[in-house]
């Protein structure tokens, strides 16, 4: 089981965030993930630092740990801008970046508020959000090749893996058609077993994000056994509150 860490980079001073990332790196954490939000109320922090700016800074502060977006909102940026941001982090990090991407919020969700404030209209239907995600991923991949209309664009080496944040079996199938390396779903999603099972059936890496807990890091716990049953190969541990370097070291020492 691969163990990752999700850092709330807006819940503590930046120096503490860097210390937390270094503690994760020293503790054998595979990848540190950062959310993609605009407003503090969406992340429960003091601020919501821009995702790719924060990842670029973490790339400079660390040396071996993987870095990823969990998840970049497909509607926040034009695909070409997203492709360039991802390629930049890949370059700065020396090839340690994974692009986690999601279809974006529905107009009635709590996360729509920040999009509307930014002048971005959320797509009203699930089908439209899935279609937009597919278009963005296709355009990002084309931009990463730097050919055609994307001639001269940044070409990351290697191309970052793409992981899709999902909340339905249908989106797992979309992710598979797009050639995504894997999917990620929250641990307590009511259809998590079906979603993870479909990802495994389609040959994709199945991963979950889950709130921290000693039982989550204990390979022999009932919680870990339950998660392993659908074929989960990666757990992204979500910290509650400010990232505490000492807590991170102690938590992953149990893994």
Image (cartoon, rainbow, N blue to C red):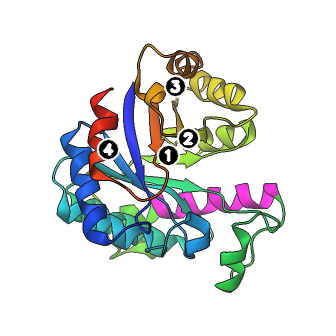
Label 4 with label 1: CB-CB less than 8 Å: no
C-alpha gap between disc 3 and disc 4:
22 Å
Label 1: which residue?
163
Mark before the other along the chain sequence, 3 or 4: 3
Q: Position of residue 214 (x, y in %)?
A: 43, 29
C-alpha gap between disc 1 and disc 3:
14 Å
Mark in front: 4 vs 1: 4
Label 2: which residue?
184
Label 3: which residue?
232
Relative height, residue 60 to residue 215 (above, below) = below
C-alpha gap between disc 3 and disc 2:
10 Å
Mark before the other along the chain sequence, 1 or 2: 1
Q: Quadrant of the N terminus?
A: top left
Label 4: which residue?
248
Magenta range: 126-141
- Residue displayed at 69% across by 80% down: 120
Label 1 with label 2: CB-CB less than 8 Å: yes
- Residue displayed at 51% across by 38% down: 182
Q: Is residue 184 magenta?
A: no
Relative height, residue 117 to residue 64 (above, below) = below
């Amino acid at each position: 089981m691969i163990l990752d860490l999700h850092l709330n980079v807006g819940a503590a001073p930046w120096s503490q965030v860097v210390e937390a990332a270094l503690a994760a790196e020293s503790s054998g954490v595979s990848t540190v993930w950062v959310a993609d939000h605009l407003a503090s109320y969406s992340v429960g922090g003091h601020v919501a630092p821009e995702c790719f700016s924060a990842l670029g800074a973490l790339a400079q502060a660390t040396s071996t740990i993987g870095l990823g977006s969990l998840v970049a909102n497909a509607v926040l940026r034009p695909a070409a801008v997203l492709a360039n941001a991802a390629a930049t982090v890949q370059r700065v990090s020396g090839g340690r970046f994974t692009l986690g991407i999601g279809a974006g919020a529905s107009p009635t969700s709590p996360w729509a508020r920040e999009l509307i404030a930014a002048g971005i209209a959320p797509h009203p239907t699930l089908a439209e959000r899935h279609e937009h995600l597919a278009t963005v991923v296709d355009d990002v991949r084309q931009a990463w090749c730097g050919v055609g209309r994307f001639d001269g664009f940044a070409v990351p080496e290697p191309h970052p893996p793409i992981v899709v944040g999902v909340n339905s079996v249908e989106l797992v199938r979309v992710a598979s058609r797009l050639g995504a390396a894997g999917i990620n779903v929250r641990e307590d999603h009511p259809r998590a077993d079906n979603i993870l099972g479909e990802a495994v059936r389609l040959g994709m890496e199945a991963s979950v994000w889950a709130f921290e807990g000693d039982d989550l890091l204990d390979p022999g716990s009932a919680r870990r056994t339950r998660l392993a049953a659908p074929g989960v190969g990666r757990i992204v541990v979500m910290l509650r509150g400010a990232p505490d370097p000492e807590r991170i070291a102690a938590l992953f020492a149990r893994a």
